[in-house]
Image: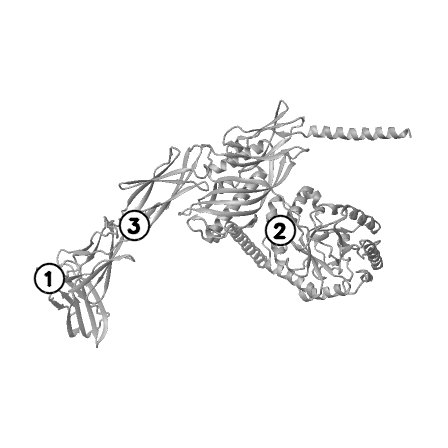
Amino acid sequence: MVSRNKNIVRVILIASYIVIIVLIVSGIGALFGYLNTGADRSAMLHTELKKIEQYTPKVVWTPLTNEGRSMDEQSLNTLENNYLDAWYVKHIAYKTNTTAGIKDYYTDSARLNLYDMIALNTDENITIESTTLEHHPTLNFFSEDGQLAVITDKDVVEYKRLFRDENMVLETTEISTYKIVLLLEDGFWRIRHLVKVKTEDYKVEHKEIATTNLNIQGINYYPQATPWDMFGDPFSKDTIAKDFNIIKEAGLNTVRVFVQYEDFEKANINKTKLDKLKQTLDAAETAQLDVIVTLFDFYGNYDVLDWTLNRRHAETIVSALKDHKALVGWDIKNEPNLDFESRGKTTVMAWLDTMINLVKSVDDQNPVTIGWSNAQSATLLKDKVDFVSFHYYEDLEDLDASIKTLQTAIPNKTLVMGEFGEPSYDGFWNPFGSNDDDQADYHKKAQAIIATNNLQYVSWTLYDFVDIPKEVVGRLPWRKNAQKHFGFIDENGTKKASFDYISKQ
Amino acid sequence: MRLKPIYILLLGLIVLSSFAAIQDSEMRIDTQLLTTQTEFEAGSAIILKFSASEITQPKLYCSSSYGSTLVTPSIQENMLLFTIPKNISKKTGQVQWKLLNDATSLSGQFKIVPIQEVTSMETYIGPPSIEAGGTDYTMLVVIPTDRLDNALPDNTIVDAKHQFLRNETSDAITTKNSIAYKNIYSEEKSGRMLVSSESKNTNSKEYTITVFPAIPTNFNISALRPHNYADGNQITTFETSVIKDKHNNVVSDGTYVSFYITNHKNNSLKTSGTTIKGVATAMMIHPDYKTQWSIKAYVDGMAESDMITLDYEQVINDFEVNFSKYNRNITIGPLQSFMKQMIPDGLQVTLLVYKDDILLETLHKTSIDGIVNFNLNPNSLKKGTYNIVITTAGLEQSFKALQLW
């Protein structure tokens, strides 16, 4: 017994010894590991510099015929980047009344002018939100040693919003010509002299696009399996073609699809996704359907300094698709009025205005509209859009009156009800909700009102969905479940009672 | 019927009152710009005067070359006075203004022009060194600026001056796009060129451009040696003639010259030197056997020299070999030079050991006091018969069937 006890003590001693050693070693190891964390060694030399696209106004160089040394493409590219960065830091400086970044892009003496202006505006509590939308630079001169350049930047479209004591006092768009002398210092092209030689208010006139031939009887479309993620990896043209045939056979002639801003990778459009969008339009053409493309969905920033990125986004899509036969119109933004409260009505309206101008400058054939979320907002920008569209999820009783009001307010423009519908959900989260028959009844009534008013329409939506991303209606189950059941076809692919009233037929 | 005049009266009153109302509002919005001047010199006090009957004080939006701001007015005798801030009035360019009152949208522009004086001559010159010969050039870029750092208007005359050797040149150039520039070409001579500029009696600093000689032309080489014996000890010095470019300028100091030496066995040796005052020197130790050297020098890729040849005479005509300690100790020497003096230390002697025509060992040693000793190691060379060959200074002696114990 004695020896057994001794052995037990020995075992315990040795075991605890081992445990302590293991703990100490692992402790030192962890400490050593911690001290070795941090930057990757390959990052030490800063060889990899990622350029983040943050400012992408349209820049059109006139062909090079400069005096002095002949310019090569790479140097011109560096010059352009630094020049635009100079504008960008200036916008930020005047927006925040701080001087960060100015040193990099303005020479010692030039930057004083900006500092003075910032000091003045700080005293008066003036801030300026501004951006430039277009630049048309000409290289006048490039010195033999490659250290000095003179450019004339014609027709710089500058948008400005002035605030005093946080209140907006002026919103203006100017078109100006600048003469700029730049020096290459420390590897940066810096502005040495900047002179505005010409300036005037910028007024843009676009010819209105006739919409008398417009006859939209359509449906908002997402594939059943991938709602709000139409152009991701599971994209299948066959599925879309099949769905488009169902839509065509149901007597409809139009689909409305959505481009999600972040999903399409903002200004630097993802080519694959754009190609999938094109394939969708091809499928629509085959099925003899027209397509309304919503250029911005899931975008809510509207910040003036974000404009150039938004414009690049829209420009890329519009110029890629504008000649497509299936295209019937551009919806600039889905339900922008929902952002009035959080972002400010002026901000959103100015954004919409500039986007309409942009789309019209790229495409002068296809009409534009804005997908307002309710009938009350639909009169906004009525003179800028070619046809007016609004979404209607309120009581059908009031629809007729709303249409009449709008028709009076906007007598000369086509009116399209861009979204309407009713979920057939009376499950756990909403036991008193409407069932399939109620939904059918809703669409029957809606079609009757549409017929009386000769209204054009795009209903919501073809399918009941299984998964709704949280970005659409949030996480609340009663909202999510309702959103799943707006379709004319249920999750098993069976046509619901409402399908009979999907169109005028 | 009596109602009719009342109606007319009422109608008349309504019309009148609305007319009065229009009158009133016209009075209210009667704000006009009184300042007629639309061009100001930079730095001058700019005050925009508006007639005003309002009590409200609208702000004035001003946008200049560098930025925008809002100006608050002062009121004087029914006038609104807007004093344009200094940082706007001192920089040239077009200034856009807008009166921010509710009723009217008065807007306009004025122009700020540079002061007609030159305070500084902003000068940029480059490249800082050019090549002689009249084809290469440097570019002088001048931005004449006024005291508020504004570039002067186009067509301002600038004198671009430069001095080179005895020539002093001055050319009138004019500014265009804020700058005036001139290409200054090199002349045939190398040297330092001084550059400056002047505009409206203001002169720039002095700038220096180095005119380097053009690329070298072919040249000659010569050799200098204490004697012509192949003693493996003395040094032959090679020297180039003064290397010049095609315009007779001595090439820049430090021009690298390579000398390539080929001996009668077609082996190559290389040495090099850099020029000082056009002359490059390089050295090479004498060979230790009779040979002939052919030497040619190059400035790589640009110029080459003629070829010279040098003969080296044999200094050792024969040497003695003594064997001792069972033939394992081999003493070579005394090795004597051209005056029978002991050859200077360091002459290489090679001993080759063969057995049945197979080379077993190669031993190298250098001479000390004219003598070289070899000890053949009994561990590696066992007792037996070997053939031994000894070479030095291009000579060779063989010992066949040498018995080693």
Earlier in the chain: of badge 3 and badge 1, it is: 3
Instruction: Place residue A167 in its image quadrant.
Output: top right
Q: Mark 2 belongs to which subunit? A: A
The answer to whether B246 is drawn above or below residue B3 in the figure is: below
Marks 1/2: CA distance?
Answer: 100 Å
Report the quarter where the C terminus of chain B lies.
bottom left
Residue A306 location (% of width, % of height): 61, 47
Distance from the alpha carbon under mark 3 to that under mark 1? 58 Å
Residue at image position (53%, 39%) is A196
Q: Are marks 3 and 1 on the same chain?
A: yes
Residue B38, image x, y percentages: 55, 32
The subunit carrying tag 1 is B
Secondary structure beneath dot 3 equals loop
User: Residue farthest to the front?
Assistant: B1
**Residue A439 percent coordinates (x, y):** 82, 57
Amino acid type of disc 3?
Gly
Q: Are marks 3 and 2 on the same chain?
A: no
Mark 3, residue position? B133
Q: Nearer the viewer, residue A386 or A226?
A: A386
Residue tagged 1: B336
- The coloring applied to the image is one colour
Q: Which residue occupies the extreme top position in the image?
A: B77
Q: Is residue A232 visible?
A: no
Which residue is under mark 2? A361
Mark 3–mark 2 Cα distance, whole angstroms, equals 55 Å
Rendered location of residue A2, percent (x, y): 58, 57
In this rendering, the answer to whether B362 lies above or below B237 is: below
- Residues tagged 3 and 2 counted as in contact (Cβ below 8 A): no
Q: Mark 3: few, some, or many residues within 10 Å (few <14, many ≥20)? A: many
The quadrant in which the N terminus of chain B is found is top right
Q: B293 or A22, which lies in front?
A: B293
Which mark's residue is nearer the viewer, 1 or 2? Answer: 2
